[in-house]
Image (cartoon, rainbow, N blue to C red):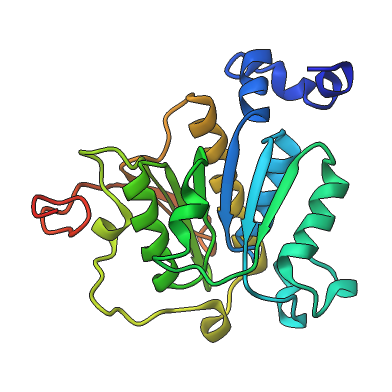
Amino acid sequence: MNDAQLLRYSRQIMLPQVGIEGQERLLASRVLIVGLGGLGSPVAMYLAAAGVGTLVVADFDAVDLSNLQRQILHGSSRLGMAKVDSARQTLAELNPEVRVEGYKGSLTDATLPPLVAGVDAVVDASDNFATRFAVNAACRSAGVPLISGAAIRTEGQVAVFSGRPGDPCYQCLYPRDGTIDETCSANGVLAPLVGIVGSIQAAETLKVLLGVGDTLTGRLLLIDALAMEFRSLRLRVDPACALCGAAA
């Protein structure tokens, strides 16, 4: 690291769990962020600020006026701009050292594996079950850790799925059974809630990359923003899960 990097990341390097070795590990890391909306905004900004060397940001959408209540990566001057391009501008201003690679295509079972290949972690900040299932399958196949988050109305959740045999996957939590999607566009969401959930996802991602602390692997963190209460539930492998259960 050079002198400018030592100064930029000094408060983080001071942590015994990080140090210079840990910071260098972050600088060499590569993370895929799926979705650049309410959750992806704080995730991308905190990972860039923390010095994660390469961020692969994926989103097919453009910035809309209704996004600006909560999607802090974007601003009024960027209405109509692709969210990937808007994210590049914000992240370059925040930390020009971070390399940002963009993907504007649809995210499916076919397109996700090449994006997941070669990354150290995947953050799912999408807002629909079809994408979440596809991301989970790609991560499970590649053995890449998945940091999953969701927020709707005044409730949120975060979990980490290691991708390792014997640990649960996202499909153990939500079986692929045709459940109707619930989205913010149909139900609304409290703006700071996505910031809370996204910040937790970012923290869990840094812990995964650094190999420190107790991650939310095998746990589901539930957030009730109205009561401002957090509770954690244990997750186990579903024997009937088509991806990681006994029949897989």
Q: Is residue 133 above or below residue 33?
A: below
Q: Is residue 201 above or below residue 226?
A: above
Task: Count how many numbered circles sit on residues in the image.
Answer: 0
What residue do we see at 80% from left, 80% from top? 80
Residue 69 left/right relative to 162: right
Q: Position of residue 136 (x, y in %)?
A: 37, 56
Q: Quadrant of the N terminus?
A: top right
Residue 108, picture quadrant: bottom left
* Residue 72 appears anywhere in the view: no
Residue 65, picture quadrant: bottom right
What residue do we see at 47% from left, 64% from top? 111
Residue 2 left/right relative to 172: right
Q: In the current view of this chain or complex, which residue is farthest to the bottom?
A: 186
Q: Nearer the viewer, residue 226 or 97?
A: 97
Q: Nearer the viewer, residue 146 or 17?
A: 146
What residue do we see at 54% from left, 47% from top? 201
Q: Position of residue 82 (x, y in %)?
A: 74, 72
Q: Is residue 46 above or below residue 20?
A: below
Q: Nearer the viewer, residue 145 or 200?
A: 145
Q: Position of residue 144 (x, y in %)?
A: 41, 42
What residue do we see at 53% from left, 31% from top? 209
* Residue 68 appears anywhere in the view: yes
Q: Position of residue 25 (x, y in %)?
A: 61, 23
